Image (cartoon, rainbow, N blue to C red):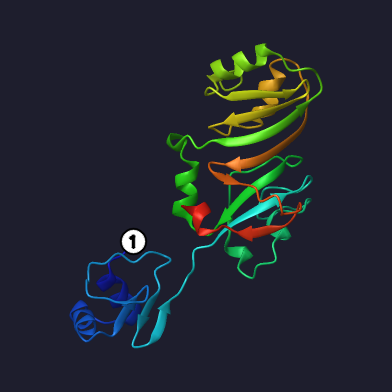
Amino acid sequence: MPRLDRYLSSLLDINRKDVRLMLAQGRVEVDGAKATNIGQVITAFSQVCCDGQTAQANKARYLMLHKPTGVVSATRHEQHRTVIDLLHQPYRDQLHIVGRLDLNSTGLILLTNNGQWSRQLSLPTSKLEKRYRVTVEQPITQQYVDAFENGVYFAYENITTRPATLNIRSDYEAEVVLTEGRYHQIKRMFGHFDNKVLSIHRFAVGKILLDKSLAPGQSRELTAQELN
């Protein structure tokens, strides 16, 4: 991320001494305030104005979407409708997906144009909790709870999953809490018991809960409280 003097010098094709003069004359604003520090860091979403003219006005966007079944967690796909296709916002082509769901899984999808934010959420060290409601073909027992808590071994990758929480809601339904997102992880963890997964619905990522007023396919921007 560039400093303000370097940013304006490159943008306006002037030298940095001229940038200093512009700041001294109060001709530059960053995020609505008069700029005084030439070393101020300019991000992709800083609002920069020079002589009353907007030089940069990108806005960070954060959305939640209720993904329906049969929709791909991708920006483009030749065969299936994508989550981007479900959006009606004019800036939808600027967005990317934070944490995918399988084709037939449903629930909370987060989208943004802020790569730094999405990377922060996706880092393995963040250990961000993702919550799912899962239905299966055969009854769930305490043995499953213990196995999820200890981690399930995946022979193909030669890894053991991180400890996961499984709360039994009924014989055939459970709430699963993961802090990682391996390929088809929930299906494979239940597959350890030869128990077929019938449905997966993600209802929370961290403290962000899927808005119950959103019908499948609908979306809205995150609130300031949800972002914090």
**Residue 192 as seen in the image, left or right of residue 42:** right
The quarter in which the N terminus is drawn is: bottom left
Q: In this rendering, would 139 be left or right of 74?
A: right
The residue under the point 73% across, 17% down is: 140
Q: Taking 83 as reference, is 125 above or below it?
A: above
Identify which residue is drawn at 76% across, 51% down: 216
Residue at the far right in the pictured view: 137
Q: Residue 139's x, y, as percent?
A: 78, 17
Question: Would you say residue 35 is visible in this rendering?
Answer: yes
Asked if 141 appears above or below 67 in the picture, the reply is above
Residue named by callout 1: 1
Residue 121 lies left or right of residue 79; in this view the side is left
Within the image, what quadrant is residue 202 found in?
Answer: top right
Q: Is residue 131 above or below residue 80?
A: above
Where is residue 31 drawn, in percent x and y? 37, 72
Q: In x, y percent, where is residue 40? A: 26, 67
Q: Residue at x 59, y 57 (%)?
A: 63
Disc 1 secondary structure class: loop
